[in-house]
Amino acid sequence: MNATSVTPIVVGVDGSENSLEAVRFAATEAAMRQRPLRIVHAFLWPLSAAVLQGALPPSTEDTRQYADTFLAEAVDHAHKAAPELSVSSAIVEGAAVPVLLHEAESAELLVLGDRGIGGISGLLLGSVAVQTVTHATCPVLVVRGQARPDGPVVVGIDGSAVSARALQEAARAAELRNCDLVAVHTWTSPVSTGPGDMLPLVYDPDAVNTEEQLLLAEAIAGVAEDHPDLQITQEVVRGPARRHLIDWSHRAQLLVVGARGRGGFTGLLLGSVSQHAMYHSACPTMVIRAPFPDNPGHSVG
């Protein structure tokens, strides 16, 4: 394989121990996908100095040396996780979000740890990861919790264009891992499907559940045809999507969710379910953002 002829898996590192775990996970993922791995550290002096050393060193040159040392350690971790993997690394000057978004433009997958600069979880997950997932042009995988090797890949389905893309990515991930795929669709009550809809005051939950089962079956029909050897379990359940997906994350290797976003408020840029999964999933979580415009469909995330 010519490493320069295929899109890489990119992992962002920030000097924390958690980002080394992300490197190990990204290396394994890259090996499964037969893709090269690119390790990137966004270097913004003096912030990088405070992170890597705990106090500002005498010069920018010294700070770069600290960054070089950590990056070399990250490359070593990648080779230990996947000895035959093609690995490259780079220190890119700039703030984390712009650097990562630029890297995402030429990546197949972007991998991040769930704790941020200096090990402060809220700093990365509250700002860098949320902004990166919201705007990245490729799927973003947040390494958190525990990947259970005997568990399935779990994906949330809502009938929208973005969840269709999430389903495709989840099926590929399950096939690569040689594990089952669980497609989860939840519902709470009848929803409006068009202007002027009159929603019933009384409805038959069994009838609604049957309709939702049909929606899920239709959603996975094409993927099942494309992946005939993949065991796909369909689960339709009444209740909040976030609760059921987080419950599944305690048994899963990987959770896959779609994200849609419009407007200028961070809380709205990611859907409620995808943002909840980033904070609370008990396993690594891949967030898929479909290109705009997408079809609104049902509201899941």
Image (cartoon, rainbow, N blue to C red):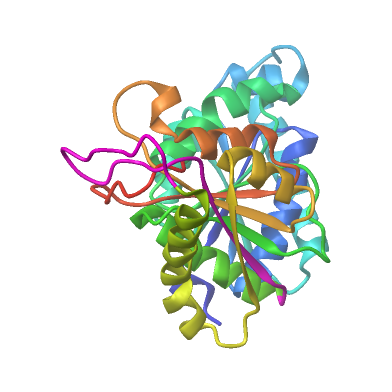
Going by the image, does 114 lie left or right of 158?
Answer: right
Residue 199: say if magenta.
Answer: yes
Main SS of the magenta segment? loop
**Residue plotted at (71% across, 33% down):** 15
Is the N terminus in the top left, top right, bottom left or bottom right quadrant? bottom right
Q: Farthest residue to the bottom: give it.
A: 228
Going by the image, does 200 lie left or right of 210?
Answer: left
Magenta segment boundaries in residue numbering = 178-203
**Residue plotted at (57% across, 38% down):** 240
**Residue plotted at (76% across, 21% down):** 53
Give residue 67's position: percent from left, percent from top. Answer: 68, 34
Residue nearer the viewer, 293 or 215: 215
Give residue 25's position: percent from left, percent from top. Answer: 72, 55
Going by the image, does 46 lie left or right of 31?
Answer: left
Residue 68: say if magenta.
Answer: no
Residue nearer the viewer, 120 or 44: 120
